[in-house]
Image: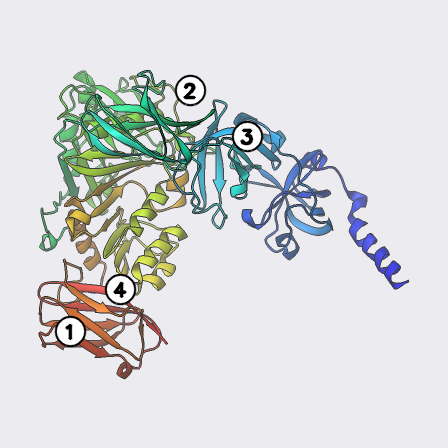
Amino acid sequence: MKKNLLSLFLFVIINAPSFAQIPIANARQQISGTSVTVRGVVTNGAELGVIRYIQDPTGAIGLYDATSAALALLNRGDSVIATGVIYDFQTLLELSPLTNITVVSTSNSLPTPQLITPNQMDESRESELVRINNVSFAAGGSTFAGNTTYDFTASGQSGVIYVRTGSPLVGTQIPVSSVNLVGICSQYSGIYQLLPRDINDFIFPLNINITSAVSTNNIVNDGFNLSWTTDIAGSSYVKYGLTPNLELGFLGNAALSTTHSFQLTGLEPGKIYYCQAFSVAENDTAFAPIKPYGTKSLSSGNIKVYFNASVNNNYATAQNAIQLLEAIDDTLIAYIDRAEESLDLTIYDFDNTNISNISTAINAAQERGVKVRFISDGSLEATNFAVSELLPTVPKILSPTGTGYTIMHNKFVVIDANHSNPNKPIVWTGATNWTDRQINRDPNNVIIVQDQTLARNYKLEFDEMWGDTGVVANLTNSRFGQYKTDNTPHEFIINGKRVQCFFSPSDGVNSKLIETINATTSELYFASMLITRVDIADALNNVAINRTCLGIVDNPSTTTMYNYLLSGMGAGNLVTNIDANEYMHHKYLTVEQSNIPQSILWTGSHNWSSNANNRNDENTLILYGTEFANVYFQEFVSRYIEAGGIVLNDKQFAQNSDLNLFPNPCSKSASLNFLNLDNQVYQISIYDINGKNILTKSINDLSKFQQLSLSELNLVAGVYMVKIATEKSVVNTKLILTE
């Protein structure tokens, strides 16, 4: 009898909401604020965060309530009855908050995904489980990052997927070959996006699949090498051409292998070629996406860097950094005056007040017959007063505003990209906007590169926003922000050195930034106006554990990761701009600046944020093995000391030191060992994570090995900063003490 009473009780509880229950399609027609009860099968679990999507035969809807413990326990296949309020969140229809969730049954079959094309991701399929076949990813071969959108194409149409932070997809490889893709059709700010739940939503239809991004190396004047891998042995072929039509045919060989490499030769210097690698195994062919690649140009490859704030040439190892005090505007005008054939300009913030008149220089170029094209940010139209000073005959467009767009944040100029003389093309870029404050007060940088392949690369990016290759813009074809595609080369050889170029938001730039940070073996220095991404902060904190990692941000309020970084890097290693009347506007970092063959410089307009990665128009340059990492480091030293960074004996930075300490990590009761290969007199200082000095000791013994007993210092387990200074160099590193 008790059993029967319990069954009756459960029946009542489970079915209580059913009196007001309506089909999901009907619920979706209700106005916001209406309370409804629906029943459906859950199609996702915690891999998409708090939200759960449910679906019945009529439609689907999202359930969201961050305070609901019952919601967090729902799994795929649960049949539930939910009561909640119709709510429109960033154009996605949800039930939020929820007043009731009842699980009717578990382990139910999920609805069969509807087979659609990208253009059919619309309101009629919102929140439903769908499938799109023959999907190709522009970023194939890279790895998925959290809080990031990725472009794909299928059936000649374009779409995006979104991967959230914490997704099981984070860190896995983006498919290179075409896949059939399953996911939930969602929406954010008017943009429909597919939400794959895990790697099982990627279905490989072929027997052979390309398993790596197609990489390029051995870039020379008449060609380059393309390499890729496949999961089973296949042939190696490359289609190529000067257009995406691949009109020049294909080359390759039929030898079967899982590792593929092919050298294209007989190409022209300084040009961009479109290529598609493919491999054949029996009756299946695996195609990589069509991508552009550039040959090495015949240009000089000269690179110039200028800063508008002070630099410290005492730390120069090859060439001195140059400060252009209140003169970056005049320098830009001088370059504009050099344009003979074409001049493409993009600028976020533009006002000639209190600076030399850049608009006059652009007008002069137009009047002397240069083909001028000009793009400015639409959101700043009301305050970009210098745009109105351009002649009516200067072709110009504004970046779009409204739902789905943020800002066109570039500040690059391309001069004479297609000039017959390869020493004429120039790219001007960096962090500096064209205003009095940005040129004369806010710490900023510009980098100027004379290289035809790079100039043609930037022109490709400009053409995509312009919508055409000619002087007249095609607003129907123009693409900005998240609507752009990864359509430019990324690898270059300039003056014998490797250079990479990436554009946002199509190229997954934050993941490239993290890769650069992770390349640190000894020393990393950065100046970034803001840092709002936890994955970037994690990478910096990881470097700071046992390597030198010093940084500058503008202020803690815009750097939402400030406290998190401070706890990982330690007091004194992360400093903030102390001048409230200026922005520390840089976005650069240097890796191994004191070792030129291993050095890396990262610079450009890209802030270290989600918007810069996912929505803004940005550009980034990465220079490998050049003296320019040290050039930027000279500027860093000035900003770091100016912001109150800890300085020891007027030195703070690694300079090819042979000093080492070990073991690290070390027991708090053990002895710390020092290896002094140069037999130098040195001073050791230990600081806690708050910057308090624990020990400062001069050691005059010139023997190679020294020991310091830690037990007498009564230290607690944790992270400490250790500085070892000699007349020759300084080591600044982290020491981890264990129990």
Judge left or right: residue 701 versus residue 412.
left
Check whether the beta carbons of the residues at disc 4 and disc 2 lie within 8 A of each other.
no
Q: How many marks?
A: 4
Q: Residues within 10 Å of mark 2 (few under 14, many from 20)?
A: few
State which quarter of the image contains the C terminus. bottom left
Disc 3 is placed on an element classified as strand
Amino acid type, label 4 = Gly
Q: Residues within 10 Å of mark 3 (few under 14, many from 20)?
A: many
N-terminal of the two: label 3 or label 2?
Answer: 3
Q: Which mark is residue 132?
A: 3
N-terminal of the two: label 4 or label 2?
Answer: 2
Residue 707 vertical placement versus 381 (above, below): below
Instruction: Find residue 729 and report its image quarter.
Output: bottom left
N-terminal of the two: label 4 or label 3?
Answer: 3
Amino acid type, label 2 = Thr
State which quarter of the image contains the N terminus. bottom right
N-terminal of the two: label 1 or label 3?
Answer: 3
Distance between the alpha carbons at the discs numbered 4 and 3: 51 Å
Which residue matches tag 2?
476
Instruction: Find residue 287 and report its image quarter.
Output: top left
Name, please, the residue furthest toward the right: 1
Question: Residue 714 in the image: x percent, y percent?
Answer: 31, 82
Question: Residue 426 in the image: x percent, y percent?
Answer: 18, 29
Question: Residue 13 in the image: x percent, y percent?
Answer: 79, 54
